[in-house]
Image (cartoon, helix red, strand yellow):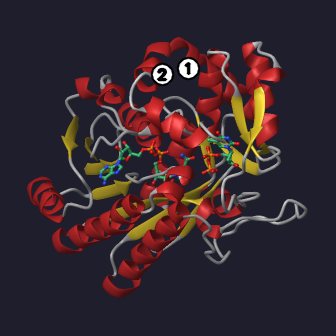
Amino acid sequence: MKTIITGGAGFIGTNYVYYVLSKYPEEQFICIDKLTYAGSLENLEGALKNDNFRFIKGDIADKDFIFKVFEEEKPDVVINFAAETHVDRSVVDPEVFLQTNVIGTGVLLEACRKYGIKRFHQVSTDEVYGDLPLDRPDLFFTEETPLHASSPYSASKASADLLVLAYYRTFNLPVTISRCSNNYGPYQFPEKLIPLMIANALKDKPLPVYSKGENVRDWLYVEDHCEAVDLVVRKGKVGEVYNIGGHNERTNLEVVRIILKELGKSEDLIRFVTDRPGHDKRYAIDPAKINRELGWKPKTNFSEGIKMTIKWYVDNEQWLQNIISGEYQNYYKKMYGNR
Ligand code: NAD
Ligand code: TYD
């Protein structure tokens, strides 16, 4: 069995590569990644020591490249993690989100159609459903919730989901989609809330909280997401969507306070800054379907998971430093300089 994992040098993809390599030593895995700012080969150093793992640098939106890889490798399964993923970047420059997330997914689907495939799995997000109001804690996203994306990022992911489902209906391509809530854990790029706050707190820099910090996200430890994706790929029903989440809702301010407390830093570091345009209020997943049909539920609760995550960033200070000392400085100035 040969699986192509796209975007395997990024946050969730890296965690997924290590998850499957330890679980399926007899199978073949190939990672395709463009190595954008968000991906790093350093993440896969350990994985590259395995004979059953290979890395190929390339762009999922490059049709000639992707078709050549499919022709040579004849994969059984393709799992598409590759994407532009940061909402704030999509507000500043949406174009690359359309290129990678929509066109890139389209190219992969065409390659699957041409060369044949046992399964194409699209790693999607709960953000395709839009947001829920803060004053209705009784509402959750189910797989039947209409797509109602808010940002260029989530709109591009929703478009990709529609394409994937169209390839099932029109061409009978054996596809599945998973839509997960916010992940946290090792290897997450420090542009996202949790690693950004850990990185700043470690350096006693201000922690920029958008608006009043009242927006709610539903947090899941990355390894639980990896386990769920693997289950959907192997046991999920073709043509179906599965929501992934663990009923762990927190306001952003709660999360930031937990990080500060864990690191023994003062709440005086918190700075309330101008809100993100179109900022989604609340995300909350109803995971009943994956629980009922595939028996999945998360193993790591938030208090354990956040401790493990903080410890990973403290233990891997050089990893963080390598990112922070480069182009990231310009990004940070541009995004937070006048906020
Ligand atoms: P990430 O930004 O950390 O990593 C993305 C990876 O994709 C990087 O390695 C990057 O180099 C690669 N990539 C980008 N454009 C590419 C292209 N054109 N061709 C090949 N590779 C390319 O992202 P992540 O947080 O690991 O997210 C992975 C997937 O999971 C995405 O599809 C995202 O939408 C989805 N998702 C993420 C979360 C989350 O909380 N992070 C939650 C739900 C779903
Ligand atoms: P983020 O990690 O970007 O994920 P997403 O917006 O895709 O859910 O942001 C999580 C929440 O944290 C979101 O409500 C925006 C907020 N946030 C801040 O308050 N400050 C920050 O510096 C960042 C990056 C995010």
Quarter of the image where one finds residue 97: bottom left
Of the numbered discs in the image, which one, if any, rests on residue 320?
Answer: 2
Taking the view exactly as shown, the residue that stands out farthest to the bottom is 170
Ligand 2 shown in quarter: top right
Q: Amino acid at mark 1?
A: Tyr
The x and y percentages for residue 211 are: 78, 47
- Can residue 7 be seen here? yes
- Can residue 238 be seen here? no
Quarter of the image where one finds residue 318: top left
Q: Is residue 80 left or right of residue 141?
A: left
Q: Residues within 10 Å of mark 1 (few under 14, many from 20)?
A: many
Residue at point 55% right, 54% down? 87
Q: Which residue is mark 1?
A: 313
Dot 1 or dot 2: first in sequence order is: 1
Q: Are marks 1 and 2 in contact (CB under 8 Å)?
A: yes
Quarter of the image where one finds residue 48: top left
- Per the model, the C-alpha gap separating discs 1 and 2 is 7 Å
Residue at point 30% right, 24% down? 45
Residue at point 20% right, 60% down? 62
Q: Quarter of the image for the C terminus: give it.
A: top right
The x and y percentages for residue 31 are: 27, 43
